[in-house]
Image (cartoon, grey):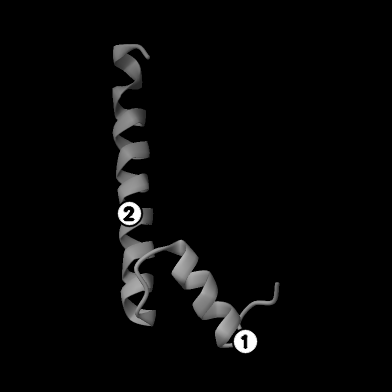
Amino acid sequence: MSEGDAPIRVLVVDREATVKTHINHAFAKIGTRNRADAVRYAYHHGLAEP
């Protein structure tokens, strides 16, 4: 990437961090620690089907 791409790079990194933060907050809210646990939670509570 060129130096002109630096602002774009910062935005992408910030967005990735924001997504990770939202996902971790969702995990905490439903009492899970990772995506696999969240999927099991969804199946168990009828929020998703296999």
Residue drawn at point x = 34 percent, y = 29 percent: 9
State the CA–CA distance, disc 1 to disc 2: 28 Å
Task: Tell me which label, 1 or 2, sits earlier in the chain.
Answer: 2
Tell me the SS state at disc 2: helix
Q: Is residue 31 left or right of residue 47?
A: left
Q: On the image, numbered disc 2 is attached to which residue?
A: 18
- The three-letter amino acid code for the residue at tag 2 is Thr
**Count of numbered circles in the view:** 2
Give the mark toward the camera: 1 or 2: 1
In the rendered image of this protein, does residue 35 appear above or below residue 27? above
- Label 1, residues with CA under 10 Å away: few <14, some 14-19, many ≥20: few
Residue drawn at point x = 29 percent, y = 23 percent: 6
- The three-letter amino acid code for the residue at tag 1 is Gly
Q: Position of residue 7 (x, y in %)?
A: 30, 29
- Label 2, residues with CA under 10 Å away: few <14, some 14-19, many ≥20: few
Q: On the image, numbered disc 1 is attached to which residue?
A: 46
